[in-house]
Amino acid sequence: MADTASKTAFLHPRFWPTWLAIALMRLGAWLPWRLKLGVGKAIGLLAWRFARRRRHITETNLRLVFPELDEERQAQLVRDTFIANGIGILETATGWCRDPEHLRHRVTFKGEQHMQRAMAQGKGALIIGIHFSTLDLGGALHSLFFPADVVYRPHDNPLFERFMTRARSRIFGQAIDRYDLRGVVRRIKAGHAVWYSPDQDFGREASVFAPFFGVEAATIKLTAKIARMTGAPVMPLIFHRNSDDRTYTLEYLPALEHFPSGDEVSDAARINAVIEAAIRRHPEQYLWLHRRFKTRPSGEPGVY
């Protein structure tokens, strides 16, 4: 009865733009590959030109993390970042709306032995994901090789939240609210792998400050806490679109040794170093559009 009521509520005109967005994502998922890339690039270029606030955030981030680049190269990287994230919208649509099996021929998976070794311990695993533009497609491609649950942030729009959760439930075993620590720990202790992305700013109370590209960044403490509570191996996962724009690479690195160390700052810095090394492979594919350095150490001015 409640589900019927919710479906009726979603017919309200305020949800019509959301229905349109969902329809466009479903359509985009089925576009021919070359057209899909073209549409994604166009979306990225439009956002680069007109989304001034996001462009300012991206420019600020890249100026902070790549001070060695001259203005021309930084400007090009900003543009490339918007293009990659525009394509990422179509990649997300593909990951959510298509069977990932149709992309198996486009994927190279490296380091599978590291994950097999970790799961053989019977303690589950904590997968360190990264907010690349390929994030959700990466999750779909990962499901071709290993099952996993995912920690996510619920969407504020209830209709889009339902669409997103249903899509991710096809890819992952369970979608776990990022505030549900007990749920994460319970699944890992039951022997599951849980995909978790610790590379965003969750505020001062949840974080310690650790270097990220040489900049002190509020870095979530939860990664080390989950590892300590579960005893699970922590598995860095790298994934990106290759330079041919037609194929993808997913790669597991070996489990982090002697982690956690008991030193929150040291542990946070180590996670940041892993993420930084992955980003440097394809910096334009990272989500520089979010305010990674929003929370500043006491006494430091804001950067945005």
Image (tube, rainbow, N blue to C red):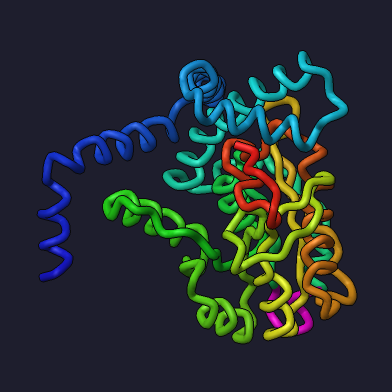
Q: Is residue 9 above or below residue 52?
A: below
**Where's residue 284, x and y in %?**
70, 31
Closer to the camera, 99 or 57? 57
Image point 60% across, 47% down: which residue?
A: 294
Q: Is residue 89 above or below residue 97?
A: above
Residue 183 visible from this viewpoint: yes
Q: Is residue 17 left or right of residue 298?
A: left
Bounds of the magenta span? 118-125
Q: Is residue 201 left or right of residue 158?
A: right
Residue 104 visible from this viewpoint: no
Q: Quadrant of residue 59?
A: top right
**Image quadrant for the N terminus?**
bottom left
| Label tally | 0
**Where's residue 54, x and y in %?**
53, 31
The prevailing secondary structure element of the residues shown in magenta is: loop
Q: Is residue 122 magenta?
A: yes
Q: Is residue 165 above or below residue 239?
A: below
Q: Quadrant of residue 202?
A: bottom right
**Image quadrant for the C terminus?**
top right
Q: Is residue 245 left or right of residue 30?
A: right
Q: Is residue 17 left or right of residue 257?
A: left
Closer to the camera, 109 or 217? 217
Image point 69% across, 43% down: which residue?
A: 107
Image point 85% across, 68% down: which residue?
A: 266
Q: Is residue 121 magenta?
A: yes
**Where's residue 300, x and y in %?**
70, 48
**Where's residue 278, x and y in %?**
79, 46
Image point 60% across, 85% down: which residue?
A: 190
